[in-house]
Image (cartoon, coloured by chain):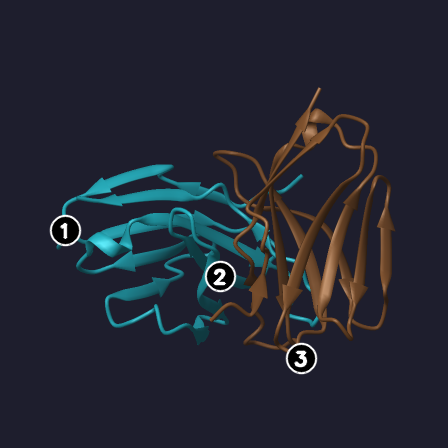
Amino acid sequence: DQQVKQNSPSLSVQEGRISILNCDYTNSMFDYFLWYKKYPAEGPTFLISISSIKDKNEDGRFTVFLNKSAKHLSLHIVPSQPGDSAVYFCAASAGGGSNYKLTFGKGTLLTVNP
Amino acid sequence: EPEVTQTPSHQVTQMGQEVILRCVPISNHLYFYWYRQILGQKVEFLVSFYNNEISEKSEIFDDQFSVERPDGSNFTLKIRSTKLEDSAMYFCASSQKAEWNEKLFFGSGTQLSVL
């Protein structure tokens, strides 16, 4: 049951270039999408999010794009830095309330080479 | 910045033994969660907890699992009789609310190895 899919297990880019991480989802009820970053031996940390009523959200070097018709979102990191090397998880939620939860993808390992 | 803390960071146990994983959520948060990640797989939801009750649980969270908030600060996950397939990284998370655009704060995880 892969409601959130990250089809690229890994991505390698040069420092200073753009990193593009992709995520697809199948559940039309998802209305909020988040990206988490995870370093080894640490828990996932929140990076950026977007609601389903928007198609773009920007925070510094990080921008998330949402294409609802394609059920696709992407995270752009510009310029990429070696410290961005981590596993990036796409996550989604459907509504709020006491049964609120996040559904995660498998993650993409980003390596930024100096 | 406030953070979710988990202990121990690593737990090795024999199959059939009971384990308790411990978490201290962020102090003003009201919603608590356990997730797990089996090596190479996605982070999976196990259970959510609010107002001293389970709000929702996944099909993974069977009768061998239980959660408790024994005092005002700790949140625990107990596995009564561990199986080999319970080996995973277990993450505790918390949130202040459970609104539609809430983000969860995660601990560093407990790596459980069942031998």
The part of the image, by quadrant, that contains residue B115 is top left
Residue B115 visible somewhere in the drawing: yes
In this view, the residue in front, A103 or B75, is A103
Colour assigned to chain A in the rendering is: brown
Q: In this view, does A7 lie above or below A28?
A: above
Left or right of B34, for residue B81:
left
Q: Name the residue under label 1.
A: B15
Q: Which of marks 2 and 1 is nearer the N terminus?
A: 1
Q: Mark 2 points at which residue?
A: B33
In percent of width and height, residue A86 lies at 60, 36
Left or right of B3, for residue A28:
right
In percent of width and height, residue A15 lies at 76, 25
Q: Separation of disc 2 and disc 3 at Cα?
A: 24 Å
In this view, the residue in front, A35 or A45, is A35
- Residue type at tag 2: Tyr
Same chain shared by disc 2 and disc 3: no
